[in-house]
Image (cartoon, rainbow, N blue to C red):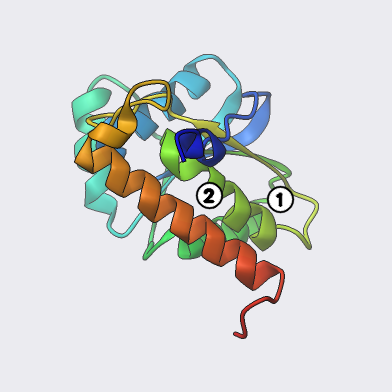
Amino acid sequence: MRYAPFLLIVDEPAEQADIAVVLGGGGGSRLRKGLSLYEAALVKHLVLVDNKKNAWDDMLHRFCPDCATEGKVTIIEGSKNTFTDAELTEKYCRTHKIKNVLVVTDPYHTRRAALIFKKQFAESEVHIAVVSSGEFGNRLAPDEKWWRDDDTLGTVWTEMNKVFIILLRDYRLLPD
């Protein structure tokens, strides 16, 4: 159980890609990582996915007030969860002929995001890599005594359960 958080974290190398898809939430950590990938010229474009456009407008204004985002950032509305994020991203990739995607989310959400996005794109030729924002926010990192912090323990437990359910469904151990 002590090493459970390490199972949740996927942090693939941030290699050259067409776009970085930044998933909503995270208190700005995901956006900061996406912006750093863009500034390092690892991606040509940022795609921000959330339930409402104004969620990103506020964050962009806060974290990058001087950024000229015209033509560099696309905001996709309609997110309900990570599954719809993957569906919306796949549609965007088909429409724009995207072949390489970096998905940016927070560390404890990376394994679940990787499972969902890779399954959504399994029939396509789009290469998906999941990159961690590297920030744990108010949660403890896996190498800390995370089990003593209620918020971190709750996050780890919830994410482990979600990953387990996704794996069960993928292997048909549970009926649809």
| Tally of numbered tags | 2
Q: How busy is the neighbourhood of tag 2: few (under 14 within 10 Å), some, or many (20 plus)?
A: many
Q: Residue at x 31, y 60 (%)?
A: 51
Left or right: residue 3 compared with residue 173 = left
Q: Residue 114, image x and y in percent?
A: 60, 47
Q: Is residue 115 above or below residue 10?
A: below
Q: Is residue 120 above or below residue 138?
A: below
Distance in Å between CA atoms under marks 2 and 1: 22 Å
Q: Quadrant location of residue 91?
A: bottom right
Which residue: 45% across, 34% down? 2
Q: Residue drawn 47% across and 52% down?
A: 160
In terms of secondary structure, where does tag 2 sit? helix
Q: Nearer the viewer, residue 52 or 15?
A: 15
Does 77 appear above or below 49?
Answer: below
Which mark is nearer the camera, 2 or 1? 2
> Three-letter amino acid code at disc 1?
Lys
Picture coordinates of residue 94, whole percent (x, y): 68, 58
What type is the residue that disc 2 sits on?
Answer: Ala
Q: Answer with left or right where residue 174 lies relative to residue 80.
A: right
Q: Residue 113 has which mark?
A: 2
Q: Judge by depth and name the residue closer to the eye, 159 or 134.
A: 159
Q: Position of residue 145 (x, y in %)?
A: 32, 25
Q: Is residue 43 visible?
A: yes
Say if residue 78 shows up in the picture: no
Residue with the most extreme bottom position: 175
Residue occupied by mark 1: 97
Q: Which residue occupies 47% across, 60% down?
A: 162
